Amino acid sequence: MGAAGVGYAVVIGLLTISWQNDVRDKVDMPAVDGVDLLTFFAVASVMAGVVFGAHRGLTAIAALARGWASRVSERPVVIRGSGILAGALGAVVVLSFLVSAALVGTDRVYAARNATTPAAISEPDSSARSAGPESAVDWDKLGMQGRAFVGGGPTAAEITAVTHEPAKTPVRVYVGEQQEDSLAARAELAVAELKRTGGFERSTLMVATPTGSGWLERQAIDSLEYLQGGDTAIVSLQYSYQPSWVSFLFHQDLPREAGQALFAAVHEQWLSLPERERPRLLVYGLSLGASGMQAAFSDSADMLTSVDGAVFSGAPNNSQPWGTLQEQRDAGSPPWQPVYDGGKNIRWLSNNGDLEKLPGSWDATRVAYLQHGTDAVTWLTPRLIWSKPDWLGGSAASGGRAPDVSDSMRWIPGVTYLQVAFDMFMGESVPALHGHNFGDVAVDAWNGVAPSGLDENAVERIQSIIAAYAHEDSMDN
């Protein structure tokens, strides 16, 4: 039996490596080598030990529970179900303790991280930035991601050097979680900051909901500022300093409440302006930010009548109206690249050029969803436990799945859910244009939603700048 078990493990291991290399090839990653193979078997051995140990532990708990029940009852407990139930309850107690301890530890780590300042970032000296001169926002209360946002980005001179056109210093407004106790108060301060900085006087105003830690993707933000010649104001607020998976699992309403609070406050002030003096109003969100920003609207019709454009990247599966739009997509269009109403107002983008592939006109208001077939954040849903997803409907050659999803992937009840859940934590470890990485298509997305009027050469220069950004960690995981 021992030799057979070892042989089985080796065969399965080799098959797994083969499948893994197929997956890596699809997302432009190098094949695993001998060191990776040894690492796989080492990790597999450790995991097998953990599973075996957990089984032995639960068995022991069940035995103790049966013994205790027999001692306190009038007759011996012989029903196996009671032991199983007691073991399950014991496991729940232990798991609850471990989860609580992990959350406490995570909170401490990210609270300390939130107090730091990224390298090369310093307190702004421009009145166009929160925490700058005369700002009511405190630098020390911005949080790490807020400091990175207001202290970064291209200058007017840098924008001009790329576009060869006159540029302005972009306005960046951000309110940290520590600044005010409530979302409503933070949103009110953000509007006050927009007034102070002249944000409502810019040609383009963008409201953004960040990810769980307060992070805003540099490529998406800078792209808009380059394309619009710095004549922009971008406003956001922090609702948490913990990684997105914590909010996703335990505080799903928080990003939605943040998106609703900030947009409502900004939109109210925007509506109070004379119609001819209102800036073009855009909204943006990545990942949990996409979920939170979409929640500011009751449905897609409300969105289309409330703003002038929107870009949402890597929307989680429970996002709305994304979910409804996916379900109501035009017949024959795949879930990873849907077509809705012929692309009249809402379009999906995975690679540069996708927005222009549809034959019909793209009317205002324009909404772009950046979406990859290999993004686990988008495809993770409890339904995967018991139901085969339509994005695994057949081979890639037959159009049954996205081109970068391996044909080796099969739906297995429960197992596929765990596989996608694990992939969610690895979504940013793959090259651009796959997984949860969308920076390389940010320029195309914004220039489609809010055309810049720049010539093709200028847009290509901007694309080169954004594409040259080093592959950066989201600092959110």
Image (cartoon, rainbow, N blue to C red):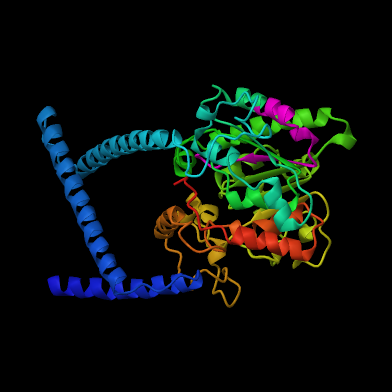
In the image: residue 103, left or right of residue 166: left
The N terminus, quarter of image:
bottom left
Picture quadrant where residue 334 is located? bottom right
Instruction: Answer yes or no: is residue 181 visible.
Output: yes
Q: Nearer the viewer, residue 257 or 298?
A: 257
Residue occupying image coordinates x 27% and y 37%: 89
**Percent x, y of residue 228:** 76, 49
Asked if residue 192 is among those painted magenta in the image, a careful observer would answer yes
In the image, is 71 to the left or to the right of 429? left
**Residue 80 x %, y %:** 20, 44
Query: Does residue 198 belong to the magenta stretch?
Result: yes
User: Position of 102 compared to 150: left or right?
Assistant: left
- Looking at the rendering, the stretch of residues picked out in magenta corresponds to 190-213
On screen, 109 above or below 228?
A: above
Which residue is pictured at 11% across the width and 36% down the height?
67
268 left or right of 147?
Answer: right
Q: Position of residue 159 (x, y in %)?
A: 70, 51
In this rendering, the answer to whether 119 lies above or below 193 is below
* Residue at 52 percent of width and 38 percent of height: 252
In front: 149, or 262? 149
Numbered disc total: 0
